[in-house]
Image: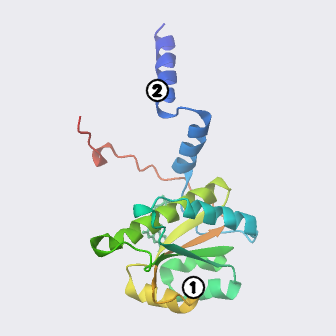
Amino acid sequence: MTLLLVVIKLVINKKTFWASNDANVAINNIMTRTSIRSYTDEPVTDAQIETLLRAGMAAPSAVNKQPWKFVVVKNRAKLKEIADSIGPSRAAAGAACVIAVCGDMTKTLDGVGRDFWIHDCSAATENILLAAHALGLGAVWMGISPDKVRVQTARTLLDIPENQEVLCFIAIGYPAENPTPKDKWKPENYRVIE
Ligand SMILES: Cc1cc2nc3c(=O)[nH]c(=O)nc-3n(C[C@H](O)[C@H](O)[C@H](O)COP(=O)(O)O)c2cc1C
């Protein structure tokens, strides 16, 4: 009887948190994503890259400004240059491609809202990371802004115009490592106001 009650409780809880199979798949994709910095030689197709870009551009943005520009780097010499010039971006060396996520300063809000481009482009970046994981690819967010030296290096390497800022690089490829996703659940990191 007790066992039956436990099973019923588990089913109810599962229904509450994971309402449908689709939701289950989406939540599972979020919970199992982890940064991948080592890749096989298998190329990423143009169709996959378009899916990633579509995911990025599907992100929310303040006042729907969509103030983003993406640069896809597939050139091996350029990927190596990125890895060699920006230490924390060294995962680029073995990646099939890097997507640079840039903010288009001609599309930002005025005044204090200007910096929402960082939120917008971060949302786009996370969408790309999750889409990559859903496609069986591995990816890692490599921070560029607000480090001025990294921004300048990225600008020069990828010929980014002055009216764009570089938020980050995303290295992408088929995973050559299989790290366990980190358990970051910490109840002390939230509170509820009822
Ligand atoms: C803003 C930001 C900047 C990051 N910069 C780098 C970076 O330059 N190089 C790198 O290898 N990883 C970078 N990461 C990835 C983090 O190290 C990683 O997300 C963190 O350790 C948590 O691990 P997980 O992604 O596997 O959950 C960055 C992540 C964020 C969100």
| Rendered residue at 53%/89% (across/down) | 85
The residue sitting at the top extreme is 1
Q: Which of marks 1 and 2 is nearer the N terminus?
A: 2
In this orientation, does residue 40 appear? yes
Q: Does the residue labelled 2 lie within 8 Å of ligand 1?
A: no
> In the image, is 20 to the left or to the right of 67?
right
Crowdedness of circle 1 by 10 Å Cα count: few (<14), some, many (20+)?
many
Q: How crowded is mark 2: few (under 14 residues within 10 Å), some or many (20 or more)?
A: few
Disc 2 target residue:
13
The amino acid at mark 2 is: Asn
The residue that appears at 32% across and 69% down in the rendered structure is 113
* Vertical placement of residue 119 versus 74, above or below: above
| Residue 74 percent across, percent down from the top left | 69, 79
Residue 96, position in %: x, y?
69, 73
Can residue 36 be seen in the rendering of this structure?
Answer: no
| Cβ–Cβ under 8 Å for marks 1 and 2 | no
Secondary element at image label 2: helix
Residue 9 % position (x, y):
46, 20
Task: Name which residue lies at 54% across and 75% down.
Answer: 69
Indicate which disc residue 82 carries: 1
Quadrant of the image for the C terminus? Answer: top left
Query: Looking at the picture, does residue 123 appear above or below residue 145?
Result: above
Q: How many labels does the image show?
A: 2
Q: Image check: 20 left or right of 76?
A: left
In this rendering, position of residue 84 left or right of residue 166: right
Could you say which is closer to the camera, residue 71 or residue 67?
Answer: 67
Specify the amino acid type for callout 1: Ile
Secondary-structure class at tag 1: helix
Look at 71% across and 63% down and name the residue there.
48
Residues at marks 1 and 2, CA–CA distance in whole angstroms: 47 Å
> What x and y, as percent, mark residue 58?
55, 59
